[in-house]
Image (tube, grey):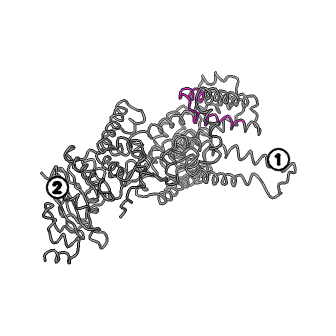
């Protein structure tokens, strides 16, 4: 069953066709990668899926709901969470508070509840704190709970972003270059963490990734974008040998070389 | 941060905790109280003692002693010493009332600017709305609007304190709508404009129907009736003096409620959402924070306190007119918030009290003393009129404070970190440079 179905998404910025009639089907429980050279429109595509941009044409259906026209927070509420390519944590909040912000849409305390400190609100707050600690433990940051996000090492910041996204209780998580800037060891750990999102938490994963080892190891399907258009889609091994993909990445000459 | 604090550290550290701290606080509070009450006539000496007396609150805040102890001493000073002082010398209670009013306004603006990060330069508009609400309805002015209507009974004042909250909040939302899409500098300019619109409306809405009585303002605004127990307690004093104390207690009540609300909101789901929004609104909305609703909520909550205080202010002054609510006032309140430390509750309290005292007591006192010296023939040139240079001194003080404490005097932990030079995190240093394409 398809959890997410995007059909013919187009997004134009002025004269630039950033995303050109791209379709993507994500099966529930799968790990899917979106790859492509820099500027291919991958992040724009993510921004359309999460409601930050409104698509010019196309439809998006998630878990039986149409997403087009919804605000990003509404989409998050329906169960899509994301991380950002250039980490966007709340720098001057602690790791724990970052995760607790992610719970916003799952908590109920309103203005009056907070002002009067109703027992239900206090219980909810205590539970949220507990849950946030569990999520930090899941990504291996339990010792860092009270540190400001900006003081965390780079790899930990990436993991904190994932913990914060998990706090929204997503069915689908979109990871924008989760291993960018990591050393080989950190990349292996990050790959393992992504696999656990699916295997232990049952969350469907879509990732944008440049590191081909990561892509080939964990994805079940790969979609390739180039200049805003989808140029290939399939299993990792099919993508690896697809001439159009090689051409997009390495140039026309490389294809000729390879076929010789 | 500064050298001075570093030098006084060992001494303060000793006095700051342990049994000695309890003793020192009690001693300090007693000595200043006795000095203050032994000679309550307005003079340079009393002014100095009054400021030393107020410093007790700062010491209470900083000292590491049990919260109950702080509360007992604090309340004794606020509810005992200051009202009693008021019966001896009305000026100092007037100062306390003004301070309470502006501390409340600073706390309210701090919600908008400090918590939610929305720079608002028109905040005084909400204060004006509250003041005009009670001003119009409690005076014959109401008859100008609907002929034959008589002013509301003054005992409805308490109800209107609550209504002031809601009307303030309503205006907060109304003025919040047009600025939802704006950030930073642009937001500041538009709120500045909206604040001016309210003032200009107050000046000009004497036609076609006389709503505000224009630039002449509204006089004889009703005061709440004096409660009998208070009159009995303070028997023998004139009504004017009792009123002074009564208004003081009311202002303290509104301030206290504001404080509780602000403190609880800051440490709640809503406070976290505001903070997240201030840090990075794109990330906040992607994490499920409905930022439009949260922005409007911040405007509404911030404005509500100003609305309620406006009602009280009108009753206190018994006269309101448009110039009271000009841009300079909004900037003054913003200066309190920034001086104290944006986003910091103790900072807003300190900033509000400090700026009020500077304005009404310290600077006029300095000017008066200089003038006195001049009359005695001390070498101050003729052209130098100290009273004229009061504001210049105020500006100079602001500049100095901002240079030495850029994050404010009692900054919020986080904002302090934000302003600090980027610290080298030894662990982070070994990490690869983040990919920022």
Q: Is residue B137 at all visible to an observer of this figure?
A: yes
Give x and y (percent) for residue B170: 44, 45
Residue B372 numbered mark, or none: 1
* B307 on left or right of A13: right
Q: Is residue B191 left or right of residue B181?
A: right
Depicted B13 relative to depicted B128: above or below: above
Measured in 3D between alpha carbons, the distance from the residue under mark 1 to the one under mark 2, in whole angstroms, is 83 Å
Q: How many marks?
A: 2
Q: Chain of mark 2?
A: A
Label 2 Cα neighbours within 10 Å, binned few <14 / some 14-19 / many ≥20: many
Residue range of the region highlighted in magenta in the rendering? B49-75
* Element on which disc 1 rests: helix
Asked if the residue at tag 2 contacts the one at tag 1, i.e. Cβ–Cβ closer than 8 Å, the answer is no
Q: Quadrant of residue A110?
A: top left
In this view, the residue farthest toward the right is: B377
Expressed as whole percent of the image width and height from the top left, the position of residue A192 reads: 24, 50
Residue in the picture at 59% in, 38% down: B100
Determine if marks 1 and 2 fall on one subunit: no
Label 2 sits on residue: A26
Q: Is residue B26 left or right of residue B198?
A: right
Discs 1/2, front = 2
Closer to the camera, B313 or B3? B3
């Amino acid at each position: 069953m398809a959890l997410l179905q995007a059909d013919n998404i187009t997004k134009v910025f002025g004269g630039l066709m950033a995303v050109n009639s791209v379709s993507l089907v994500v099966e529930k429980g799968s790990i899917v990668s979106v790859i492509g050279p820099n500027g291919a429109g991958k992040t724009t595509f993510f921004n359309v899926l999460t409601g930050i941009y409104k698509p010019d044409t196309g439809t998006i259906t998630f878990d039986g709901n149409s997403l087009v026209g919804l605000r990003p927070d509404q989409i998050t509420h329906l169960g899509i969470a994301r991380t950002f390519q250039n980490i966007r944590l709340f720098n001057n909040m602690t790791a724990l508070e970052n995760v607790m912000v992610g719970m916003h849409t799952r908590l109920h305390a309103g203005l009056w509840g907070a002002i009067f400190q109703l027992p239900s609100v206090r219980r909810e707050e205590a539970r949220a704190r507990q849950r946030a600690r569990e999520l930090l433990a899941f990504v291996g940051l339990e010792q860092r709970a009270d540190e400001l996000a900006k003081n965390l090492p780079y790899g930990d910041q990436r993991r904190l972003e994932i913990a914060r996204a998990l706090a929204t209780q997503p069915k689908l998580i979109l990871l924008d270059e989760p291993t960018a800037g990591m050393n080989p060891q950190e990349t292996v750990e990050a790959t393992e963490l992504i696999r656990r999102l699916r295997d232990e938490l049952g969350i469907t994963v879509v990732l944008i990734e440049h590191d081909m080892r990561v892509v080939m190891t964990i994805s079940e399907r790969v979609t390739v974008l180039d200049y805003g258009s989808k140029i290939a889609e399939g299993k990792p091994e099919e993508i690896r040998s697809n001439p159009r993909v090689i051409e997009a990445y390495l140039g026309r000459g490389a294809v000729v070389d390879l076929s010789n | 941060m500064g050298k001075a604090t570093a030098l006084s550290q060992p001494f303060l550290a000793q006095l700051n905790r342990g049994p000695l701290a309890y003793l020192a606080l009690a001693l300090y509070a007693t000595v200043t109280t006795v000095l203050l009450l032994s000679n309550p006539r307005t003079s340079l000496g009393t002014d100095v003692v009054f400021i030393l007396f107020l410093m007790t609150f700062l010491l209470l805040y900083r000292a590491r002693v049990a919260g109950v102890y702080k509360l007992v001493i604090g309340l004794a000073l606020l509810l005992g010493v200051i009202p009693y002082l008021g019966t001896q010398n009305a000026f100092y209670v007037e100062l306390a009332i003004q301070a309470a009013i502006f501390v409340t306004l600073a706390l309210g603006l701090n919600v908008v600017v400090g918590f939610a990060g929305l720079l608002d330069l028109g905040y005084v508009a909400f204060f004006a709305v509250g003041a005009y609400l009670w001003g119009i309805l409690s005076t014959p002015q109401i008859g100008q609007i609907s002929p034959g209507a008589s002013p509301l009974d003054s005992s409805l004042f308490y109800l209107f304190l609550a209504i002031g909250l809601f009307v303030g909040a309503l205006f907060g939302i109304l003025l919040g709508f047009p600025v939802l899409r704006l950030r930073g500098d642009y937001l500041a300019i538009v709120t500045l404009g909206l604040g001016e619109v309210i003032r200009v409306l107050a000046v000009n809405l004497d036609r076609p129907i006389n709503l505000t009585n224009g630039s002449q303002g509204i006089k004889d605004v009703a005061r709440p009736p004096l409660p009998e127990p208070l009159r009995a307690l303070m028997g023998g004093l004139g009504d004017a003096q009792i009123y002074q104390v009564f208004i003081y207690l009311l202002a303290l009540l509104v301030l206290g409620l504001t404080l509780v609300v602000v403190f609880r909101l800051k440490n709640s789901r809503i406070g976290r959402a505001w903070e997240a929004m201030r840090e990075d609104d794109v990330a906040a909305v992607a994490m499920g924070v409905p930022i439009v609703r949260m922005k409007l909520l911040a405007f509404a909550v911030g404005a509500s306190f100003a609305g309620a205080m406006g009602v009280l202010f009108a009753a206190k002054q018994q006269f309101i007119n448009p110039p009271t609510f000009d841009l300079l006032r909004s900037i003054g309140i913003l200066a309190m918030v920034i001086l104290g430390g944006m986003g910091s509750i103790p900072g807003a309290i300190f900033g509000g009290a400090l700026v009020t005292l500077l304005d009404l007591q310290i600077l006029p006192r300095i000017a008066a003393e200089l003038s006195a010296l001049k009359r005695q023939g001390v070498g101050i040139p003729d052209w130098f009129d100290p009273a004229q240079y009061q504001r210049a001194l105020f500006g100079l003080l602001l500049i100095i404070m901002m240079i030495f404490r850029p994050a404010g005097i009692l900054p919020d932990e986080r904002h302090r970190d934000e302003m600090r030079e980027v610290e080298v995190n030894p662990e982070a240093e070994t990490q690869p440079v983040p990919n920022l394409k």
